[in-house]
Image: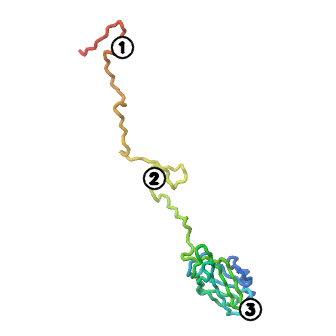
Amino acid sequence: SRMDHLQQVRLALREAPHARYIPTASPYIVCSQLPSHWRCNKSLPDPFTVLVLLPVPDGTQVSVSAGNDDNSHGEVRNATAVVRKQTAKFSDLRFVGKSGRGKNFHLTITVHASPMHVAVVNRVIKVTVDGPRDARHKKDTPPLHSFPPRIGLPHPLLTSPTHFIPFYPPFGALPIPVLPFNSIPQTRKRRSSTSDYQSQSSPDTPPKIWRPF
């Protein structure tokens, strides 16, 4: 009977994981969790399911629509399903319309029973052309020693300041310093001149004249 099916659905809802189903604006309708960001015209990872928590006959049609301020009627494919034992399962629900940059779709679930029941889920899914992508600031770190280190400087990938790569220049790479001629020390003893003899002798002694022979 319908009441038995309703009790089974409520029991399954209590035993289901907390993140599997989300509430709607109607206390009698719950739906399965949708991804927060998805690519347009792509199948969902899990079939979208609607649970009706009040007795409705089997074969009742359930429809889904999406929209927001920028796109009031977002295109949704395979947006109808049929109730079986208080459960409506959508085989391949696809969101074709785009929600817009930084915008999410509001989902409207309509149970075409008598009376009709309508439930809304606000800001439930974001639909874009590319879908979810990695953050732009994330970059792969190059492996260690992927490029030669700078000569004579610490390696950029080594965090410890003690790791230092010394620089040994090849032979002949550096110029040999050449000292000017005036800076070379005089090793040979300079010959004494006559003035030297005159300065070393006493004033009473006549100067000595040096002769080579």
Query: In which quadrant will I find the N terminus?
Result: bottom right
- SS for callout 1: helix
Q: Amino acid at mark 3?
A: Arg
Marker disc for residue 199? 1
Residue corresponding to mark 3: 2
Q: Which residue is at a point 37% across and 46% down the rendered structure image?
A: 173
Residue sitting at the far top: 204
- Mark closest to the chain's N terminus, 2 or 1: 2
Horizontally, is 130 left or right of 199 in the view? right
Horizontally, is 38 left or right of 20 in the view? left
Q: Amino acid at mark 2?
A: Arg
**How many residues crowd mark 2 within 10 Å: few (<14), some (14–19), many (20+)?**
few
Compared to residue 157, the image places residue 85 above or below, namely below
- Mark closest to the chain's N terminus, 2 or 3: 3
- Number of marks present in the image shown: 3
Q: Amino acid at mark 1?
A: Ser
Compared to residue 208, the image places residue 141 above or below, namely below
Where is residue 159 drawn, in percent x and y? Answer: 54, 53
Where is residue 61 drawn, in percent x and y? Answer: 66, 91
Residue corresponding to mark 2: 150
- Considering depth in this image, is 33 or 4 the residue closer to the camera? 33
Q: Check if mark 2's residue and mark 1's residue have beta carbons within 8 Å.
A: no
Residue 127: name its quadrant: bottom right
Q: CA distance from mark 2 to mark 1?
A: 65 Å
